[in-house]
Amino acid sequence: MDGVAAEPLIELDSVEKVFTVRRRAGRLRRTRHEVRAVDGLTFQVPRGEMVGYIGPNGAGKSTTIKMLTGILVPSGGRLRVAGIDPSLQRARLARRIGVVFGQRTTLWWDLPLKDSYELVRRMYRVPAAVFRANLDRCIELLDLAPLLDVPVRQLSLGQRMRGDITAALLHDPDVLYLDEPTIGLDVVSKAKVRSFLRETNAERGTTVLLTTHDLTDIEQLCHRVMVIDHGRLVFDGDLAGLRAAADGERTLVVDLAEELPPIEGVPGARTVKVEGPRQWLAFPAERSAAPLVTAIAARYPLVDLAVREPDIEALIAELYAGGGAARRDPGGADPAAPDPLRP
Amino acid sequence: MARRHDGTADGRLRTLGEGGRAYGLIAWMWVRSTLAYRTSFALMTLGNFASSALDFVALLLMFSRVHALGGFALPEVAFLYGTCSLSLGLADLAVGNAERLGARIRDGTLDTLLLRPAPVYAQIAADRFALRRLGRTSQGLLVLLWSTGRIEVDWTPGRILMVPLMVVCGAVIFGAVFTAGAAFQFWAQDAAELQNSLTYGGNALLQYPPTVFARDLIRGVTFIVPLAFVNWLPALWLLGRPYPLGLPPWTAFLGPAVAALMVAGAALAWRHGVRAYRSTGS
C-alpha cells in the first residue's frame, strides 16, 4: 500500500451499458429493444474503503461489476480501476483484482482444493514466499487446513465459498469484488466470512466492493453503501443515512411470558402484530432499540427479544415511496465522494 | 486470442507465450481431473479409437467388393483417410473443445475465465482438454503409416517432407474452423452443429477421393471452406493424379498459405466475438 489515500482506486464517470434485446413479436417479426442496464453511473471509491453495492434484482449491480472487471465493454463513459481501463487491458487488470461470484466457483471440481491454489500461483506468477504467507493466513483465519486435500466437489457451500475467497486473495489484489459472498451460507459460515473480510480490509488495506441482499453484511462490514436502481445511483452514504432517507422501519420482536393484549404506551413504537405471547413492534429504523426495550421490560414480563432489519427490497421501495426522488445522506460518511446524486 | 498487446512484434510474441503457458497449465489441470476417474478415462480412449476405427473397417468392407473407388485403389484411399483423420485428430485434441464456448456462455462460467490474467482463447481451447482424443489421432496415424508403405510414390526428399507438412497444415485448417465456429457462438450459442458439419463432416468427405463427388461440392470445399487443401490437393500431387476443376499443379503447395489465411480469419472472428460478449444473468 502506498498510503496515498486521496487518489481513488475505482473511478466511474457517466458509465453506460446498453443491451439490445430482440423479442419475438408474432411469428417471424422480431422487435429490437434497448435496455439501459447501467445508465450514467458516476462514483469513486478511494483505496482501502469497503463499500456495499446494493439494489434490487436487475438493477445493474452485476453489470457494473462485470464492467469493472473487464468482462463487459461499457457502451459509454469513462471507467478506471487502479488506473487501468478494464476492457482494454483485462489481463493486466486481472493481476490487480480478486473476484468472487457467490454462485460460480473458480475452483477445480474434481481436484483437491490445494491444486486450485497451485494453479493460481502459477498463472498469476505469485512469488513463492508471498503465496505461502497469503495461503497460510487464509488457512488459519478461514479454517481451511482440513479441506486442502479434499476434492472441491465434496465441499459444502460454505466451505467452497471460503475456498473461493482464498483463491481470490492469493495474488495480493488491490481490489476485491464480492458478488453475494454470503448467499446460501449458514450462520456460522457467514460470521466467519464477514470477520475474515473485515480483517483483510483492516490489515492489508484491500479495497472491497460487495453486492449483497443481506443487510447484515452491509451493517457489519461497510461504512458506505451505494444503492443502484434502473442503472442509476439512487443513494450514496452510510447505512443509517439510507434508513433515514427511506423512512424505513425496523421491527422489534418480543416474547412475553404470557398472552397479553397489544403493548401500548411505548413512545416511538407501535404494535403491528400479535401472535400468542409474541408481539411485533415497528419503530423508525434510525432510532436505537434500547429505550424501547427498557420501556417494555419495565412494564411487561419480557422473556426474549430480537430486532429485525428491513430487507433491501423494502428499503428501496420505501426510498421511492417517500418522496420519489433520491436523496443524499445528510451526514454522509464519505464527504470525499464528489459525485452528485441523480434523480 | 492475442487480445491485448502493445502492437509490437515483441508484444505479440509475449501474448502468444502467455497463451501457450496458460494453455499448458489448464490442459494439465484437466488431464489430472480426468485421471480422477481412471477407468472411465481408459474406456473413453478405447471407445474413441474404436469409433474412428469403424470408419476404416467400413472402407475395408467396401474394397472387399470393388477394386477401386473413383479410380483410386485401397492404399490410396487409405492415404487420404489417414492424413485427414490425423489432421482432424490433432486439431480436435488441441482446440476442439473451443466448441464448448456456447455452453460456457449459457451457464455463465465464461466469466470466470475472463477474470484470469491469460488470453481467453488459450483457456477455452484447453477447456476440458481430453487425452482420450489421442484415440482418433493414433488410429489415423496407424492407417497413414500402413498406406505410405503401399502407395506407389517415388519418395524424393521433397515428397517425404510433403506428408508431415500436409498433416500439420490440415490440422491448422481444421483448428481454424473449430475456432471460427466457436467464435460464432458468441452471437449464436447453439451454433456448434454448423461447425461440426464442417469439421467431422468435412473429415468424412475428405476420406474419399474427390473423383467420387459432384463438381459443385468440390468447388465448395475448395473456394468457400477450403478443406480441399487439407489433404486432397497435396495428396493428388504425391500420387501423380489429375487435379479436380482443372486447378493448376501449384495449388498443391498452397496449404501453408491457406492455413495462414484461415488462422487470420478465425482470429479476427474471435476478437470480434470477445468484444461482442454480453455475459448472462447475475
Image (cartoon, coloured by chain):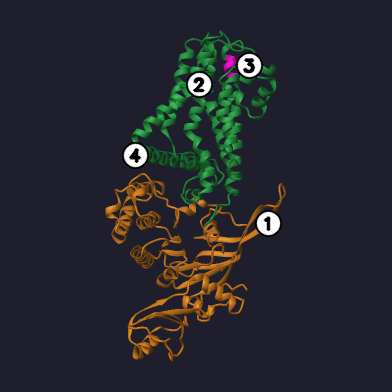
Find out whether residue A12 is within the magenta segment: no
Q: Which residue is depicted at the point 47% across and 65% down?
A: A212
Separation of residues labelled 4 and 2 (CA atoms): 31 Å
Look at the numbered discs 3 and 4 and tell me whether their residues touch, using CB distance below 8 Å: no
Q: Amino acid at mark 2?
A: Asp
Chain of the residue where label 3 is placed in the rendered structure: B
Q: Nearer the viewer, residue A189 or A92?
A: A189
Q: Give the drawing colour for chain B.
A: green
Relative to B280, does residue B240 appear above or below in the rendering? above
Relative to A53, does residue B93 appear above or below in the rendering? above
Q: Give the drawing colour for chain A.
A: orange
- Residue behind mark 2: B55
Find out whether residue B235 is within the magenta segment: yes
Q: Which residues are magenta?
A: B233-237
Badge 2 and badge 3 in a common chain: yes
Q: Earlier in the sequence, mark 4 or mark 2?
A: 4
